[in-house]
Image: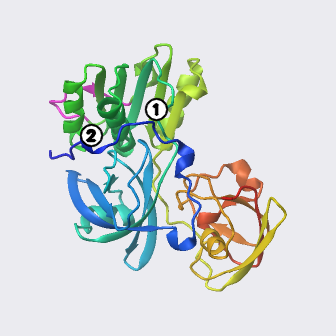
Amino acid sequence: MQTAAFHPSLIVAGPRPSASRWTRFVRPEQLYRQARVAAVERQTEDAVSITLAPMDDKPCDAAAGQYLTLIADVNGARIKRAYSLSQLPDQNAFTVTCKAIAGGRMSGHLNSALKAGDLLQFAGPSGEFLLPDSVPAHYAFVAAGSGITPIMAMLEQLLEIDRCRTPITLLFGNRREKDILFRDRLEQLVSAHANLSVSYYLTRPGKRWKGQQGRISAEALPQQPGTHYFLCGPDTFNSSLREALLNLGISSTAISTEQFTQSSDERRPHPADPHPVQFRLADGSEHEVTVRPGESLLEAGLRGGVPLQFSCTMGGCGHCKVTIETGDVATDEPNCLTESERQAGQTLACCAWPHSKAVVQVAETGL
């Protein structure tokens, strides 16, 4: 299997970026960046790695574990989806990896129709699934399926850039052997770094499979004192392992999770008419903006000069959280809001669409 190569010589070593660095406060016309597809590389029968070369002069900075929000027109619909960086960027390009999902319009488009030379818009990088500032006694990474993608960038950071000598364990679960992403890259890293161990788990193993079988359990995870755990997979995968680790006495501060959720097209139709929205800021000032058809609260607010905070622009990070005081405002699903936040009238400006006149309270701004 052909795999993308690491490019450590193109990375400038130094302090890792903090999560707060990636929150952008910009004008609406700068909300998304344009990129040309430099390469599309097949990883498995249903996954590709996509290298994007931005068409501006901004540096390709990102922290290991972060993701990009890709925006594309697919069969007349404008779709936004988040995909993790599967390797650290060089000065001129980002690389993400996308696995096709049954019925997924964006993942299907990226896997079957996208080609080198095509143009895409993107936002980010975003995300707070990051390596800790302090070095733990042991790194334990646990991935399911395409949850391996941000972990690949983290392993690159630790082993190729930081020259980490701390023990690193990766447990990687898949259905079938042919589904294993980045296997060649992982085997190369294992051969080059004695402190890295990788175990593969299959739920549908073939007759010749000699690795682990079944699902990954908490009992299989290393439990040395001082271990930091990184869980990346579907929500049920993350939550069950996290709960098991907590029951074993592991501190919640030693567990980092990144949820990979299949995006849903379940939503109310976006409004076809303009609606006035009053933004009330924490300092007492007010801004009234008419939200045009096709505009989210975030896009309209930025156009009207409201200093809104945001990052991923697709409901995954929570940076653009606001409270609806009055009015009918629909929110696209899924998103990262908790049930208590919904009950409190909160929404995410990036995926909120007013269907009437509304008043919005903004607790935090980009000032």
Structural crowding at the residue carrying mark 1, measured as other residues with C-alpha within 10 Å and reported as few (<14), some (14–19) or many (≥20): many
On the image, the x and y values in percent for residue 256 come to: 52, 34
Query: Taking the image as drawn, is residue 221 in sight?
Result: yes
Query: Among all residues in the image, which is located at the extreme right?
Result: 284
**Residue 206 magenta-highlighted:** yes
Residue type at mark 1 is: Phe
Q: Image quadrant for the N terminus?
A: top left
Magenta residues, start to end: 205-215
Q: Quickly name the residue at label 1.
A: 230
Q: Quickly name the residue at label 2.
A: 8
Q: Earlier in the sequence, mark 1 or mark 2?
A: 2
Label 1: state its secondary structure. strand
The answer to whether residue 116 is left or right of residue 266 is left
On the image, the x and y values in percent for residue 93 come to: 31, 56
Q: In which quarter of the image is residue 101?
A: bottom left
The answer to whether residue 206 is left or right of residue 99 is left
Identify the residue shown where x is 66% and y is 49%. 338
Identify the residue shown where x is 38% and y is 19%. 166
Residue 68 vs residue 44, the one in the foreground: 68
Label 2: state its secondary structure. helix
The answer to whether residue 185 is left or right of residue 223 is left
